[in-house]
Amino acid sequence: MSAQAHRFYHLGCAKLTRSNLSRINESKPYQLYETLSSKLLTQCQRQTKGHRFKFNSPLYSLDASTIDLCLSVLPWANFRSTKGAIKSHVGLNHDGYLPEFVAISDGRCADITAGRKLDFPKGSITAMDRDYVDYTWFNQLNDKGIYFVTRLKRNARYRVIKRHDARRNSGVTSDQTIEFTGTQVAKAFPSRLRRIGYRDSLTGKHYVFLTNQFKLSATTIAAIYKERWQIELFFKWIKQNLKIKSFIGTSKNAVLTQIWIAMCVYLILAFIKLHSKLSISLQQIVRLLQMNLFEKRGLITLLRGDPPDRGYINPNQLILV
């Protein structure tokens, strides 16, 4: 910003310092940016065209990411005796890879505690890791007509009710209908579930999936869980590109403001990508905007890589007399 100070007058900007920005983040309520992100999400959803799978059910990935904070500077973010942190809980819609459900909690909040509060649409499929295994919650999802795909815990006690044909050449080692035999688990989830064994041909690692979805093929269930990796990439991209590892301001409001602004920026970038319909990554969009932030250029021409329009130049100006 300091290097571009000569452009402030034409842009209508004032001089900006770190202390001014910190004071703004401290005073403006973070709910303003939380509401703005909701409005931006609605605009993005109008541009999406579906996920990469053939089935029509909405697909979500559910996960949480811990953001480390300095406890001595931000004592309100108490996580451990010598460490501060907050958590970002996200339900990522694979239709456009949009963070449709976002919640910010303190670092000690369990993933499943935030997961129970999310209201997924009926008929949707949600992929999650074992941190979200709660059979009472799974039973509630099942009653609402919501499907889940997760990994079976190693100590789970069950009996096989029916064995289905498994295409071993596709990596599927088993496909079974089971019911739990443990007293508490059977009471929490009395219905039958589907257990799928799958071996990854690239890594050789064996996975055991648990789902209440019986119509899709076993390979599709395995692919759905593999697609859950997109939410890991989302958290990684946000942290690396939108500066939520270091914060300007020490109050809780300032930290939440910066996180919600990062979500807003991500949604703006996602809208640009969806609306332009160009095969360009978010990373490329960020780099182009960073290098051309103060240039008077059309956004679409910039993303297409078209040369800048310099306007009409009088050829006589090139003649030296």
Image (cartoon, rainbow, N blue to C red):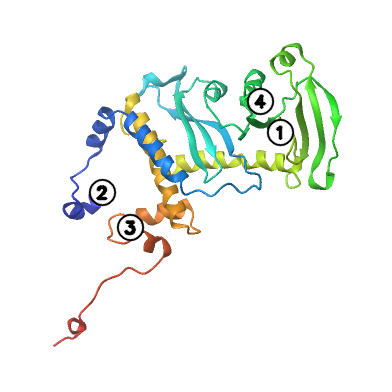
- Give the x, y percent position of residue 276: 44, 57
Which one is earlier in the sequence, the residue at label 3 or at label 2? 2
| Label 4 secondary element | helix
* Marks 2/4: CA–CA distance: 52 Å
Residue 295, image quadrant: bottom left
- Left or right of 245? Residue 235 is right
- Give the x, y percent position of residue 267: 42, 43
* Marks 4/1: CA–CA distance: 10 Å
- Left or right of 8? Residue 173 is right
What amino acid is at disc 3? Asn
* Marks 1/3: CA–CA distance: 48 Å
* Marks 2/1: CA–CA distance: 52 Å
What amino acid is at disc 2? Met
Which one is earlier in the sequence, the residue at label 2 or at label 1? 2
Q: Which mark is residue 1?
A: 2
| Label 3 secondary element | loop
Q: Which mark is residue 213?
A: 1
Q: Which residue is mark 4?
A: 142
Which one is earlier in the sequence, the residue at label 1 or at label 3? 1
- Give the x, y percent position of residue 269: 42, 48
Q: Residue at x 27, y 30 (%)?
A: 28
| Label 1 secondary element | loop
Instruction: Give the crowd class for mark 3: few <14, some 14-19, many >=20 residues within 10 Å.
Output: few
Q: Is residue 99 above or below residue 268?
A: above
Q: Nearer the viewer, residue 80 or 208?
A: 208
Q: Residue at x 25, y 48 (%)?
A: 1
Q: Which residue is mark 3?
A: 292
Q: Residue at x 63, y 30 (%)?
A: 146
| Label 2 secondary element | loop
Q: Nearer the observer, disc 3 or disc 2?
A: 3
What amino acid is at disc 1? Gln
